[in-house]
């Protein structure tokens, strides 16, 4: 493993998968309003994506993404080496997001219950 690979691995291992600031804010508000949900849950067994909040009975999945992933011009920061960042690979992750969304919509329309 090269030094760049090791540095990238260490940086990505520190990224939170759940319990981020925006996610906690949304969860606190929804919980205070009386909503109950699953956290960091895979809505369908064959789906690679995991929803930040999953309302299983209502069959609703919520993904809470921060400014970095949405490239917010006000809050997002760009890494020093763009070619090693997830933003640089957005051309590969965007189709995966669209595939997950399409899979969830298709399942919802077909009436198949989520796992």
Image: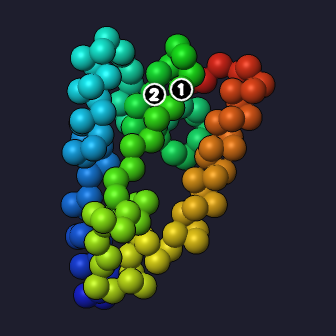
**Cα separation between marks 1 and 2:** 6 Å
Numbered circle sitting on residue 84: none
Is residue 41 visible to us here? no
Image check: 25 left or right of 66? left
Locate the N terminus and report the quarter of the image it occupies.
Answer: bottom left
Q: Give the residue drawn at x 24%, y 17%.
A: 32
- Which residue occupies the foreground of this view, 52 or 25? 25
The local secondary structure at tag 2 comes to strand
Image check: 21 left or right of 39? left
Image check: 69 left or right of 9? right
Q: Quadrant of residue 108?
A: top right
17 over 33 or under it: above or below: below
Q: Are marks 1 and 2 in contact (CB under 8 Å)?
A: yes
The local secondary structure at tag 1 comes to strand
55 over 66 or under it: above or below: above
Q: Quadrant of residue 28?
A: top left
Name the residue tied to disc 2: 54
Image check: 100 left or right of 79? right
Locate the C terminus and report the quarter of the image it occupies.
Answer: top right
Name the residue tied to disc 1: 60
Q: Quadrant of residue 31?
A: top left
Color scheme of the displayed model? rainbow
Rendered location of residue 109, percent (x, y)? 75, 27
Q: Give the residue drawn at x 57%, y 22%.
A: 59
Rendered location of residue 19, percent (x, y)? 24, 41
Q: Give the residue drawn at x 63%, y 60%.
A: 95
């Amino acid at each position: 493993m090269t030094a760049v690979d090791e540095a990238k691995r260490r940086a990505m291992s520190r990224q939170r998968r759940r319990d981020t600031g925006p996610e906690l804010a949304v969860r606190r508000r929804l919980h205070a309003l009386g909503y109950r949900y699953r956290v960091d849950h895979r809505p369908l067994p064959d789906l690679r994506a995991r929803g930040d909040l999953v309302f299983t009975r209502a069959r609703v999945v919520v993904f809470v993404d921060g400014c970095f992933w949405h490239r917010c011009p006000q809050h997002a920061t760009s890494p020093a080496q763009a070619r090693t960042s997830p933003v640089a690979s957005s051309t590969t992750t965007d189709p995966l997001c669209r595939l997950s969304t399409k899979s969830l919509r298709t399942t919802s329309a077909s009436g198949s219950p989520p796992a």
